[in-house]
Amino acid sequence: MPDFRSDTVTRPTPAMRDAMATAPLGDDVFGDDPSVNALQQEAADALGFADALFVPSGTQSNLIALMSHCERGDEVILGQQAHTYRWEAGGMAVLGSIQPQPLEHRPDGTLNPALIAAAIKPDDAHFARTRLVALENTIGGKVLPPDYPAEVAQIAKAAGLAMHLDGARLFNAAVAQTAPADGPAPSRAAVVDAARAICRSFDSVSVCLSKGLGAPVGSLLLGSRPFIARARRHRKMLGGGLRQAGVLAAAGRHALAHHLVRLHDDHRHAIALATGLRRAAQGNGALAGRLRVVDPQTNMVFVEVDRGIGGALARHLADAAIQVTGAERGDVLLQRWVTHLDVDAADVETVVAALERFEG
Ligand SMILES: *Cc1c(COP(=O)(O)O)cnc(C)c1O
C-alpha cells in the first residue's frame, strides 16, 4: 500500500533493527547511555557544534530550543507557516510564555530580511523583548537559498538576537544543494559539509531522525555547551528525559551513518512523481487541465486539484490503496505527496497508472 502521507511513516530497516537490538545501553538521565552519548557526539562533530541533545520529537526539540533561548515574555520572529508557529499546538505560548511574531513568507519560503529588521522591537516597556529569529529549512519542501541564513544572521547579531533553525529536514536541504535530483548521488562527506555550512549561521539547530532518515523515533538539538545544559533541564521539565534511550539512539546513529545519501533517491522519486502527475494533467483523460503540479525541490510534491474533482480523485486513490494527504484551500484541494525510504520507483509508477485510470 504506497503511503505518500509523510516521510514519518517509514519503518526501521532490518539493519537498523539489528543496530537497535545490539546497542550498548545505560541510563541517559544519569548521562551514562553510551549509544546516546555517541549519537550526540557524532552529530555535534558532523554539524560543527560543541554539544547535542537527543530528544523524543521534533516538536519537543523546537520547544526546548525556544525555552532555552527565551525567558518568559520574550519574543521570537518566525514565519507564518513555520512548523514551530503553526503545527506545534501553540506550545511556545502555553508552556514557554514566549510570544511569536509571525511574518509572511515570500514565494521561495524566505522571510524578507527588511521585514525581520523592522519587526525587532525597541527596548521599551510597552514591548515584548525580541530575543530570537527562527528559520526552517527545508520549508514546505523548499530549500532556503544558500546565502540567506547568513544575511538574516547579520541582522539578528547586530540586534543581539539568537538564531534557531528548525532543520527537521536539514539533510534534504543539504542533499538538494549538493546534487541535482536528476544527476548522480552526492558523497556522504559532501552532504555533511553542506549541512554544516547551513548550520554555521545558527546558535541552535533541531534535526529530525524520524523523517526521511528513517529512524522510528527521535530528534537532535545542537548548540553550545551552556545552551545544551539549559536544554537538558528543559527536556527533563517537559518529560523528555528517557532512560535506556540508546535503543532509539542506535537507530539514529545507523540513520546518520547510512541514510544521508539515499535522500537523493527520494528527491529523484519526487521528480518522477511530478512528471507523471503532470503527464496526467496534460493528457486527454478526466484530469486534463484540472491539476497543477509544483516542481519539487526535495521530497515533497504539491498538487492543486480543482475542487470539482477533488473528492472523486481522493476516493479513487483510496480505492487503489494509495495514501496521500489533502487539504481544502479555497477553490482547490492541495495534495501533498511525500517520498521516503519506504516508497520506491514502482510505487511512483503505481500512482501514475492509477491516475491514468481515473475517469472522474
Ligand atoms: C515534523 C516536523 C517537526 C516536528 O517533528 P515531530 O517529531 O513530528 O514532533 C518540526 N518541524 C518541522 C519542519 C517538521 O517537519
Image (cartoon, rainbow, N blue to C red):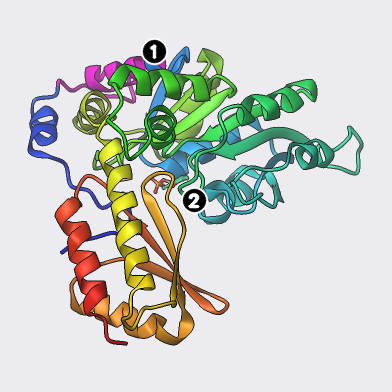
What amino acid type is highlighted by mark number 2? Gly
Q: Name the one closer to the observer, 161 or 151.
A: 151
Which residue is label 1 attached to?
45
* Left or right position of 83 against 52: right
Which residue is label 2 attached to?
140
Residue at 27% in and 26% down: 256
Residue at 11% in and 36% down: 17
Residue 339 visible, this orientation: no
What amino acid type is highlighted by mark number 1? Asp
Specify the quadrant of the image occupied by residue 275: bottom left
Q: Name the one closer to the observer, 279 or 354.
A: 279
The span shown in magenta is 24-44
From the top left corner, tell me how far across and down residue 343 is, in percent: 20, 52
Query: Dot 1: what SS?
Result: helix
* Left or right position of 173 against 130: left
Mark linked to residue 250:
none
Residue 192 visible, this orientation: yes
**Counting other residues with Cα less than 10 Å from the Cα at mark 2, is it few (<14), some (14-19), or many (20 or more)?**
many
- Asked whether 118 falls inside the magenta stretch, the response is no
- Asked whether 30 falls inside the magenta stretch, the response is yes
